[in-house]
Amino acid sequence: MQPSSGALRQVALAGGLLFAMALHGAHAADDAGDKITIMVGGITKLIYLPARLTEQLGYFRDEGLNVELLSQPAGVDAENELLAGAVQAVVGFYDHTIDLQTKGKDVKAIVVFGQVPGEVEMVSSKAAGTVKSMADVKGKTLGVTGLGSSTSFLTQYLASQHGIASSAYTMLPVGADASFIAAIKQGRIDAGMTTEPTVSALQKAGDAKVLVDMRTVEGTRAALGGTYPAASLYVQDAWAESHKAQAVKLAHAFVRTMQFIHTHSAEEIAAQMPADYQKDKGLYVSALKASLPMYTADGKMPADGPATVLKVLSSFNPSVKGKHVDLSATYTNEFVGAK
C-alpha cells in the first residue's frame, strides 16, 4: 500500500526540520568555538592587568572560550582595529565609547575594570623644585602617551582646573613604559602622565615624583570631581547583539578575575603573572599594591562615573565638545549581571 501524498509531505517536512536543527546545532557549536581576539592597549600595564590575569587563571578556558590577546600600546590604534573588524573586543579606556558615539559608531563597555584612571602625573626630579602642582606647568613640556589620547585630555583638564590654557605648555607624545622613562631621564619632558609599573620604577630610581595621583578613588575625586571609569572591555554593539552567549561568558570570566583580585594579596596575584612581566619582582608587587584600589569588585560601571568622563572630554575633545551624548548607550551591566 502506497503512503498518501499528505503522509509523504509530513515525512519530508519532518526530515527538513531535523536537517535544519542539525545545521543550527552545528552552527551553535561553531559559534562557541569561534576565536575572540582582544586588543589590549598595552598588555603589561597594571591598569589592564585583568586581561592577562584572566588568561593565566584559566577563566576563559573554563567558560569554553577561545581567546587570543594582542597588545597595541596606543588606545586609538586599538579602537581602529575594532572598527575595522580585525578584533572583536578592546581592553582600553571607557572614554573611547563616548568619543566614538559622537562619530556615529555604536560601541559600548560591557565590563569595567577600573573605577579610576590609574594614571599618575609624574614630575621629573630636575623640575620638581619649580613644578609643585599643575598650577606650575606654564611653559613646561608635558609627556602624554599620544596626542588625542586619554592622557592628553586628562592633562589638559588638570591644567585647566588651575586656569592654565593648553596653549601655555607643550604636550609631547612619549608613549609608555621604557620610552616614558627615557623621556624623563633625558630631560625631554618636565612632567608627564603614566601608569604602574612605570610610576614605581621612576620613584625607585629617584628620577621622578608624584604630582597628581589618580590610582585611588580619593585621589581621583580630588583631581576630577568624581570616579572616572577607565580600563574596560568594549565591543561593537552589533557584535554584542549577535554573540550574546559569548559576551556573557566573556563578562563572567572577567568578573571572576575581579573577584580574585579583591580576595588575594598583591603577592598572590603577582605569582599568577608571567615572569617576563616582573623582571624586578619586588618592584612589581609594590606597584601592584599601589594599584589595587583602582579595580572594581564586580565589573560594573560606577554610578557617577560616565558623567565625570563626559565632563572631562567635553572640555577638550573636539569630537565631544558641544555634542549630545547618550551615556546609557556607552556601557551596559547586562552581561556582567547575566546568570
Image (cartoon, grey):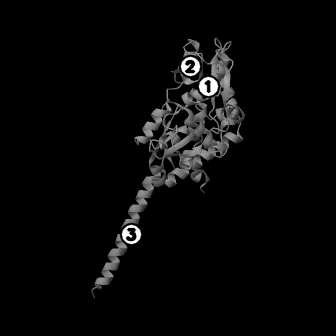
Name which quarter of the figure residue 231 lies in: top right
Instruction: Please state which amino acid type lies under the numbered disc 3.
Output: Leu
The residue singled out by tag 3 in the image is 18
Helix, strand, or loop for circle 1?
A: helix
Q: Does the residue at mark 2 contact the one at mark 1 (Cβ under 8 Å)?
A: yes
Residue 85 on image: x %, y %: 41, 43
Confirm whether residue 55 shows in the render. no
Q: CA distance from mark 3 to mark 1?
A: 66 Å
Q: Nearer the viewer, mark 3 or mark 1?
A: 1
Residue 132 lies, in percent from the top left, at 69, 18
Disc 2 on helix, strand or loop?
helix
Q: Earlier in the sequence, mark 2 or mark 1?
A: 1
Q: Position of residue 125 (x, y in %)?
A: 65, 13
Q: Which is more toward the observer, 296 or 151? A: 151
Identify which amino acid the numbered label 2 is placed on.
Answer: Ala
Residue 310: percent from left, percent from top:
58, 40
Residue bearing the label numbered 1: 159
Q: Residue flagged by tag 1: what amino acid is it?
A: Ala
Q: Which mark is residue 168?
A: 2
Label 3 to label 2: alpha-carbon separation: 71 Å
Q: Residue furthest bottom?
A: 1
